[in-house]
Amino acid sequence: MLRFTRESVDLKSVEVDLAEGFQRLVRELLAPELPGLSAFAAGGKDGGIDLWSEGPPRAVVECKVVGVDTVPVVLARWRETADHLRTHLASPAGPTAGQAQYAPWYRTDRPIGRYLFCTSALLAGLGQVDRVRDEISAFFQDLASWPHLAHLAGLAVDVRHWG
């Protein structure tokens, strides 16, 4: 099976790094499912949002290149995103100063209703996909227990992996 690795993907012709190449691939693959899918620059400040679609529901996509096909490594990469979200969404007044890219998570007039976590790792079966999805879902349910993020209570989480 072809894998999304530095060795197997030639990105020189499009002048992007591996993370941006993966983000572009995910965008192309999800475009039929998520009309109007748009992207932020890979590697920049994205607020846990690499791609988004206005929906309905409003959907955001996080893309993670993970070079090892194990749940612990995939979850470690997710936890990096979770730590940033927890830190920058903690205040009811809005995102941490200088971190305006987290503002979409606060919106109640156009709330984020769907979160897709996409990884280049190959997970071995539905049990592993469920384990990742369950951890991400529990994280967002915890965030939704904060009164200023209660609108995230119904957030649907989906995990897409290389398989």
Image: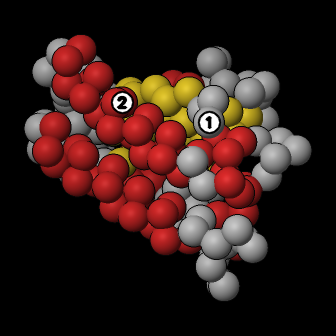
Q: Position of residue 52 (x, y in %)?
A: 66, 42
Which is more toward the observer, 57 or 25?
57
| Residue 109 relative to residue 82: left or right | right
**How far, Cα to Cα, is label 2 from label 1?**
15 Å
Tell me which amino acid carries mark 1: Ala
**Which residue bears the numbered disc 1?**
153
Quadrant assignment for the C terminus: top left
Q: Residues within 10 Å of mark 1 (few under 14, many from 20)?
A: some
| Residue 139, above or below 34 | below
Q: Position of residue 104 (x, y in %)?
A: 72, 55
Q: Residues within 10 Å of mark 2 (few under 14, many from 20)?
A: many
| Residue 118 relative to residue 77: left or right | right
Residue positioned 67% across, 45% down in the render: 150
Residue positioned 68% across, 54% down in the render: 147
Q: Earlier in the sequence, mark 2 or mark 1?
A: 2
| Mark 2: secondary structure | helix
Which is more toward the observer, 161 or 131?
131
Q: Quadrant of residue 82?
A: bottom left
**Which residue bears the numbered disc 2?**
133
| Mark 1: secondary structure | loop
Which is more toward the observer, 60 or 90?
90
Q: Position of residue 60 (x, y in %)?
A: 61, 41
Residue positioned 16% across, 37% down in the render: 71
Q: Residue furthest top?
A: 126
